[in-house]
Image (tube, grey):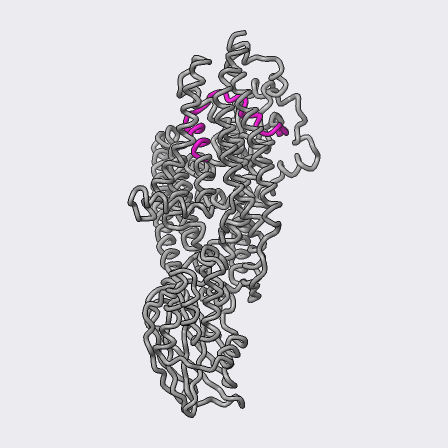
């Protein structure tokens, strides 16, 4: 069997054709709601109000993260829930994100609507990669999560970026090309269970392109997507503008198995695969620095190298943690090269996506600890706003044993998802024994990363607040 | 978008403003502000009052002492010594340190607190140098400043403490070595107008501080202990103003450019 034959394997075809699936837009209530002018505004405005309130709390409220309602809402509630949302509903958060609303408002009043600069189109994802790494590093270096003021300044920086983008560039340039959370969301949304696509048979004959250009009903796709040619949900925020605009009823919203999109990436991009590997490193860093052994590791590092400065020690540890998953993927790609004939870069780009399922699982598992072990902190800090102090009560929603069990379950699911994705990618790009052989190095890598994750979640973690 | 109609927009911002205005902002001093701290010591009521938010530097301090009949005591000699318990931690009340240092140190700390005279014994029994050091650090200022209240009196003071209990508990649990950036002794003077003793203390840096208040009435010494959180200088408003300025600049630049380009288009249209 040739590579092309492998790509056209008949068992894959039903999964690729959305018309075979139930279109959620045909559902009376779902279709009516997404087509109504209330969506997504009905979520956007409350989100913006809450965001403004959080900003005030972070910048003008108590210094103590432990007592700050803004910190609790952002890092104990929102941040742990957001990857779960990406998994379930794709980038739907991006449709109601307060930054997007600010962007639209600025654009409405003073927007110059200039085309997106070429360098952003070309290097946007690399910029997102760099920003994501920088923000994670600065979280430890200067304090973001544990400092309400730090968190507030981060949000203000993002707001300024959004205001600039909305003031000068078209649509939601910031969300598409610059937002670090958008980059993460894009990667995670590929594992998401919702897919929005045009119906090929209908779009084929369409010359209006109302979905992209917009109509009186709604503006064109804010994310610069063209449903006619969309093969990924990475940039779709499910704002339903295309649903409102399409004169032919071509748009379909279907449910798909988690990770399915990762099995058939048409044009794998190195920067997206790189981000997947980097996220693995970031999850490691976040886990390791919250473990009790972190101080022992630092002490050992200081003794071994003579470096006494925490910032230097952390930065070196951070670089190592980022480099390990990237290096391991490159190594696996090098081994795979022997079996499928593709270059190391090609294999890195193709198979790097397989890590995303484990990334999502590791990310959710890590933050599940904060959500479930510190969840009541949201209520306590909210009560404090009205003068009711709660002292001495446990902020935990579940005991640590139950949380750990959930974490292990999630890692197991992520491991299965990544392993199966790697298998499908191998099968999609090669045939027979060659595909099985190409799968082995990445299977070994994913197993290793899952074992490391298991190990990390077995150790006791420190609280965020 | 249709949703962004002016009316809707205004309604949204009005709702946001109302929400922001309705909710009382959390006080940055975690409860050690103008409401003050209160303790009952040997039948005397001690009320400590500060500015709303404690920051490093010279801080005015007001102490009101009342007797059993709630009448102000006007003839006492009042002095206060400040001792830093822990450096500032944004994580809140030195919680992380508390976790790290465990309970062992906390026990010894509590013993010494209950009776400062037993500090030497605690030193002898302290298993390691770190604990011994902590005890020395704690005992030193009390000895140096003649902090010699009866054990029972101290215990009573502790039991009636209405100080920031949350903060105090954490500090006790932490068993931190008391790094006190050395305690200075500040005398307070009676001021008729406020019916209280006025003076000042200096907090050298942000963190958790203990204030040992000593006063004697008719030759009888008494003491009380308060724990307060001193917060770093707050950049919040300055940062907010700076960002607001920057964003206004961006918006103004965009508005000017938009007008210019609109004018250019109009001219081109007219020429055509």
Work out which quarter of the rendered image holds the N terminus of chain A and state it. Answer: top right
Q: Which residues are magenta?
A: A253-279
Viewer-closest of A287 and A390: A287
Assess whether residue A51 is covered by the magenta stretch. Answer: no
Q: Position of residue A143 (x, y in %)?
A: 40, 50
Q: Residue furthest left?
A: A306
Q: Is residue A115 visible?
A: no
Q: Furthest residue to the top?
A: A1
| In the image, residue A264 lies in the stretch drawn in magenta | yes
Which quadrant of the view contains residue A403?
top right
In the image, what residue occupies the spot 69% across and 37% down?
Answer: A29
Percent position of residue A42, x then y: 59, 46
- Residue drawn at x 41%, y 79% is B213
Where A29 sits versus B160, above or below? above
Residue B59 picture location, percent across and down: 36, 73
Give left or right: position of A29 versus B222.
right
């Amino acid at each position: 069997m040739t590579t092309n034959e492998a790509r056209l394997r008949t068992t894959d075809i039903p999964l690729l054709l959305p018309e075979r699936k139930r279109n959620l837009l045909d559902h009376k209530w779902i279709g009516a709601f997404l087509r109504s002018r209330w969506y997504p505004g009905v979520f956007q405005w409350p989100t913006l109000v809450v965001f403004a309130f959080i900003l005030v709390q972070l910048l003008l409220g108590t210094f103590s993260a432990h007592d700050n309602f803004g910190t609790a809402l952002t890092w104990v509630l929102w941040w742990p829930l957001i990857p779960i949302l990406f998994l379930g509903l794709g980038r739907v958060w991006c449709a109601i994100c307060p930054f997007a609303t600010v962007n639209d408002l600025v654009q409405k009043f003073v927007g110059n609507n200039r085309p997106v600069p070429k360098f952003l189109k070309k290097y946007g994802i690399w910029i997102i990669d760099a920003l994501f790494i920088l923000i994670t590093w600065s979280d430890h270096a200067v304090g973001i999560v544990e400092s309400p003021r730090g968190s507030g300044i981060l949000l203000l920086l993002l707001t300024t970026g959004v205001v600039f983008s909305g003031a000068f560039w078209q649509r939601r340039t910031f969300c598409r090309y610059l937002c670090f959370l958008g980059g993460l969301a894009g990667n995670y949304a590929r594992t998401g269970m919702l897919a929005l696509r045009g119906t090929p048979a209908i779009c084929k004959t369409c010359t209006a392109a109302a979905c992209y250009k917009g109509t009186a009903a709604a503006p064109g796709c804010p994310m610069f997507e063209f449903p006619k040619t969309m093969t990924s949900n990475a940039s779709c925020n499910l704002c339903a503008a295309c649903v409102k605009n399409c004169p032919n009823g071509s748009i379909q919203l279907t449910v798909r198995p988690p990770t399915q999109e990762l099995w058939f990436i048409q044009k794998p991009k190195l920067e997206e695969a790189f981000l997947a590997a980097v996220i693995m490193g970031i999850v490691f860093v976040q886990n390791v620095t919250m473990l009790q052994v972190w101080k022992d590791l630092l002490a050992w590092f200081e003794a071994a190298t003579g470096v006494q400065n925490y910032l230097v020690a952390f930065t070196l540890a951070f670089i190592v943690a980022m480099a390990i998953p990237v290096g391991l993927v490159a190594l696996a790609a090098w081994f795979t090269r022997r079996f499928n004939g593709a270059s190391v870069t090609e294999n890195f780009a193709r198979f790097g996506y397989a890590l995303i399922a484990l990334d999502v699982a590791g990310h959710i598992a890590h933050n599940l600890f904060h959500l479930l072990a510190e969840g009541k902190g949201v209520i306590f800090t909210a009560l404090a706003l009205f003068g009711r102090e709660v002292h001495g009560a446990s902020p935990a929603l579940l005991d640590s044993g139950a949380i750990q069990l959930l974490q292990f379950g999630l890692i197991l699911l992520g491991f299965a998802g990544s392993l199966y994705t790697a298998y499908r990618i191998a099968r999609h790009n090669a045939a027979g024994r060659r595909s099985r052989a190409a799968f082995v190095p990445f299977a070994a890598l994913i197993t290793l990363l899952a074992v490391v994750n298991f190990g990390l979640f077995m150790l006791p973690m420190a609280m965020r607040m | 978008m249709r949703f962004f109609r002016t009316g809707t927009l205004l309604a949204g911002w009005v709702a946001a403003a109302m929400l922001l205005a309705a909710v009382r902002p959390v006080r940055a001093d975690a409860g050690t502000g103008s409401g003050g701290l209160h303790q009952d010591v040997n039948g005397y009521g001690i009320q400590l009052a500060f500015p709303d938010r404690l920051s490093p530097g010279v801080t005015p301090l007001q102490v009101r002492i009342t007797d059993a009949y709630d009448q102000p005591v006007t003839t006492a000699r009042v002095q206060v010594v400040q001792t830093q318990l822990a450096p500032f931690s944004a994580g809140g009340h030195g919680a992380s340190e508390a976790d790290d240092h465990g309970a062992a140190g906390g026990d010894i700390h509590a013993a010494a607190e209950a009776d400062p005279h037993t500090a030497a014994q605690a030193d002898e029994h302290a298993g390691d140098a770190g604990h011994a050091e902590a005890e020395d650090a704690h005992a030193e200022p009390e000895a140096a400043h003649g902090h010699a209240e009866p054990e029972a009196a101290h215990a009573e003071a502790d039991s009636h403490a209405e100080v920031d209990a949350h903060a105090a508990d954490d500090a006790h649990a932490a068993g931190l070595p008391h790094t006190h950036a050395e305690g200075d002794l500040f005398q307070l003077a009676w001021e008729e107008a406020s019916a209280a003793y006025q003076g000042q203390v200096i907090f050298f840096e942000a963190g958790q501080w203990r204030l040992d208040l000593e006063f004697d009435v008719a030759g009888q010494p008494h003491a009380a202990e308060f724990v307060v959180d001193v917060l770093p200088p707050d950049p919040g408003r300055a940062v907010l103003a700076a960002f607001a300025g920057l964003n206004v600049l961006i918006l103004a630049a965009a508005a000017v450019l938009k007008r210019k380009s609109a004018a250019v288009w109009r001219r081109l249209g007219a020429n055509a």
